[in-house]
């Protein structure tokens, strides 16, 4: 799986083959997250940092624009529905 990328990382970094494969798997898992999963995770993370919902939802809306495959822009109401159902 992803042998060319593993080879590239082992040539261009001090990572071993196993470490390079784990890094690739972690990155792919991160970007495999659905929009809903991302919104819920970021809400939990930002809430744990002490931010209030107004700040959280604004930050999440901004963060979504920088995802690899940016979803359509979501309103505050849509973000709240993802988090609270």
Image: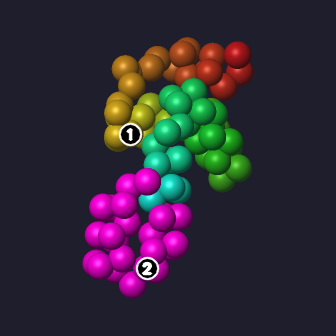
Q: Earlier in the sequence, mark 2 or mark 1?
A: 2
Q: Count residues near mark 1 (Cα–Cα under 10 Å), then give few for <14, some for 14-19, many for 20+.
A: few
Q: Quadrant of the N terminus?
A: bottom left
Residue that mark 1 sits on: 67
Dot 2 falls on a residue whose secondary structure is: loop
Q: Position of residue 64 (x, y in %)?
A: 42, 34
What's the CA distance linking mark 2 and mark 1?
26 Å
Disc 2 + disc 1, Cβ < 8 Å? no
Tell me the quarter of the picture where residue 12 sits. bottom left
Residue that mark 2 sits on: 15
Residue 80 - label: none
Magenta segment main secondary structure: helix
Q: Is residue 22 above or below residue 15?
A: above
Residue drawn at x 51%, y 47% as measured from the top left: 30
Q: Position of residue 7 (x, y in %)?
A: 33, 70
Residue drawn at x 60%, y 33% as measured from the top left: 37
Q: Count residues near mark 2 (Cα–Cα under 10 Å), then give few for <14, some for 14-19, many for 20+.
A: some
Viewed as shown, does residue 61 lie left or right of 36? left
- Regarding residue 51, the answer to whether it shows in the image is no
Residue drawn at x 52%, y 20% as measured from the top left: 76
Q: Is residue 70 above or below residue 49?
A: above
Residue drawn at x 38%, y 66% as measured from the top left: 6
- Front in this rendered view, residue 25 or 78: 25
* Residue 21 magenta-highlighted: yes
- Regarding residue 4, the answer to whether it shows in the image is yes
Query: How is the rendered protein coloured?
Result: rainbow
* Residue 78 magenta-highlighted: no
Q: Position of residue 84 (x, y in %)?
A: 71, 21
Dot 1 falls on a residue whose secondary structure is: loop
Tag nearer the camera, 2 or 1: 2
Image: magenta residue range: 1-23
Q: Is residue 79 above or below residue 40?
A: above
């Amino acid at each position: 799986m992803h042998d060319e990328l593993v080879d590239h990382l082992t040539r261009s970094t001090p990572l071993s083959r196993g470490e390079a494969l784990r890094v690739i798997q972690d990155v792919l898992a991160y970007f495999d997250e659905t929009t809903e999963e991302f919104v819920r995770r970021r809400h939990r993370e930002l809430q744990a940092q002490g931010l209030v919902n107004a700040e959280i939802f604004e930050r999440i809306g901004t963060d979504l624009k920088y995802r690899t495959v940016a979803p359509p822009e979501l309103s505050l109401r849509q973000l709240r529905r993802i988090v609270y159902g």
